[in-house]
Image: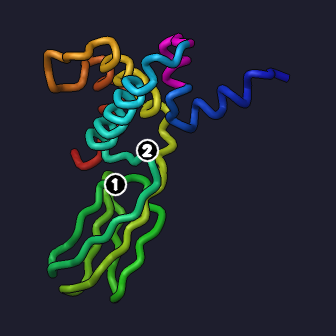
Amino acid sequence: YNPYYPIYFVFLYMITIEALKSWLRIDFNDDDLTLQTCLDTAKEVIEEYTSHSLHAHTFEVESYGCDIKLYDYPITDIVADDEFKRYNKPDSILLSAPFGTKFVISVGVSDKKQLHSAVYQLASYYYENREPDHVRLPTSIQVTVNQLRRGLI
């Protein structure tokens, strides 16, 4: 029995400020607002860079007679107000439907642990470098997430 297992388990599957503080070995609360900002920004950047969702959400799209390509991952549900065809591609989902078809797309939370690690690495980078000198992801983080990027095939 390991008394730390429940905490470790939570840190693995939830991206939290407490986990970031543990990652950085910070035991004070003075920088919580800054840390939360760094964490939120890092999460958005990693989501945008990889098209893997780190929070459950729903969005709507409408067909204009052309196929709709979805890179978001993982898609948990697709509801449409008309008949449609779904094609699963290696890096995306293709939806084919008549003009005017409205879709409600539900996206879950990616189970890729290296994304969580990348978020903590990037949040740490933002925290330690309050004025980054470049816009790109640091190379060490790119190496962690490049194989998970969707929409490159």
Residue hosting label 1: 72
Q: Which quadrant is the N terminus positioned in?
A: top right
Q: Are marks 1 and 2 in contact (CB under 8 Å)?
A: no
Q: Nearer the viewer, mark 1 or mark 2?
A: 2
Confirm whether the magenta stretch covers residue 83: no
Residue 26 lies within the magenta run: yes
Identity of the residue drawn at 54% across and 25% down: 19
Which of the 4 image quarters holds residue 48? top left
Q: What amino acid type should be assigned to the residue bearing mark 2?
A: Leu
Please state if 142 lies on the left or on the right of 18 as rendered: left
- The amino acid beneath tag 1 is Asp
Label 2's element?
loop
Q: Position of residue 83 (x, y in %)?
A: 34, 87
Pointer 2 residue: 54
Q: Main secondary structure of the magenta part?
A: helix
Specify few, some or many for label 1: CA neighbours under 10 Å numbering under 14, 14-19, or 20 or more: many
